Amino acid sequence: MEKETKIKILKDLIDIKSVNDNETAVAEYLLKLFQDHGIKAKLVAEFHNRSNIVAEIGTGEHPKIALSGHLDTVHQGDERTWKSEPFSGTLKKGRMYGRGATDMKAGMADLAITMIELVESGEPINGTIRFIGTIGEELSAAGSKYLTDKGYVDDLDAIVIAEPSGVSLHGLRSYVNSDGVTIEPEVLKSLLKKAFLSDALEQHFIIKAHKGWMAYRVTARGKAAHSSMPQMGINAIDSLIKYYLAEKEFYANLSESDPELGRTVYSPDIFHGGEQINSVPDLAYEIVKVRTIPQVSNEELIQRLQNLITKLNAQPGMELELTVEHSELPVKSDNHTHLIDIFQKHAAHTMHEPDELPTIGVSLGTDASEFRRRNETMDVVVLGPGNTTAHSPNEYVEISTYLDMIKLYKATILDFMAHNQA
């Protein structure tokens, strides 16, 4: 496939507005792209105007590897902060700008082009390669949950998720020293030295482990009263604040840590209380998103929080309730298929970066949490074009990285097939 065609595919995908909706338009574009190149593909409808897509090439036998990503994007935010139209891919100085350029239209385009070029190369595919495009990853992992329940990952030996895993060299030091990244000290020391001497644009990593996550709501109930006589009521906001302060102390005192993932990450994101200024509020709530580790499982964390609430509810006027709204498990790869090793081997001659894909653990989540629910033994690698501009205004992907990643995927997949023959 010509370079210009690959860039056009990326722009076309960015031009489709799929802010946690309208994924069918993205899926239909990819469906036609596959069909035009003789690859069997199908849409898997889930909701109105929201379809997943699955395609497959190869023999249908093992080894079986999936290439996966999501079709949705986050909201563009305040468009006044953008220097270009968010939903019109803009090519400028070697970068493609637009919402989803990094997260993760570039990854989806790369995976699709990889499959097309493998077919057109005429090289034998001694195994099975399955493309999985999901809806709703950004908010609920709805697509990966649905496809997992339908059995689309049951038979896989490995899966590659093309989430953005790169960072510009200008921001490398702050990235690897952040609370959201865990990297071995000696690897970090070597990487920073190599980066100082490099004229590359970015460094990409293999994410071999990532935290799980959980969203929960804590509701405080009080007693409504006229604001001229507040002593006649029970202010639910007071109860929520008392809980919130206890909750902050609870998380600060969590001592458990994972060598690859670090500690549990707590982020209370939404608070709501009161409806009008002349009434004592009888309802208030907070919504928390917490990033979890195996040492304090999602279930264990909920039990500890419930114990805290039970203790507080024993106090006069306190009425708190905990509701879990979503729960995804942590993910680790054990590399039993040597997929990580194979990626690192081929990165040396395809990626042109300071180091050959060092492995890290991160706090973000991916569809892998759902996929692993029904297939705990498959290897999982998170690696894709793109960088830390995901979810930001003026999100972009380096075109050079976008093109190099296709070469890396192709070389790695063929090697994986040869390495894992029964």
Image: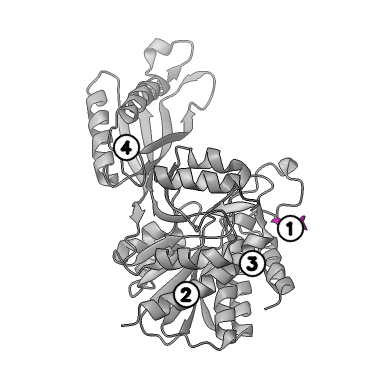
- Label 3 Cα crowd, 10 Å radius (few <14 / some 14-19 / many 20+): some
In the rendered image, residue 205, in percent from the top left (x then y), is placed at 49, 54
Q: Amino acid at mark 4?
A: Leu
Per the rendered image, the range of residues in magenta is 91-96
- In this rendering, which labeled residue sits more in front, label 2 or label 4? 2
CA gap between label 3 and label 1 equals 11 Å
CA gap between label 4 and label 1 equals 49 Å
- What residue is at 42 percent from the left and 22 percent from the top? 237
Q: Is residue 330 above or below residue 36?
A: above
Closer to the camera, 159 or 402?
402
Q: Amino acid at mark 3?
A: Leu
- Label 2 Cα crowd, 10 Å radius (few <14 / some 14-19 / many 20+): many
**Total residue callouts:** 4
Q: Are marks 4 and 1 in contact (CB under 8 Å)?
A: no
Q: Amino acid at mark 1?
A: Gly
In the rendered image, residue 299, in percent from the top left (x then y), is placed at 26, 45
CA gap between label 2 and label 1 equals 27 Å
Q: Main secondary structure of the magenta part?
A: strand
> Would you name the residue on which mark 2 appears?
413
Snapshot quadrant of residue 92: bottom right
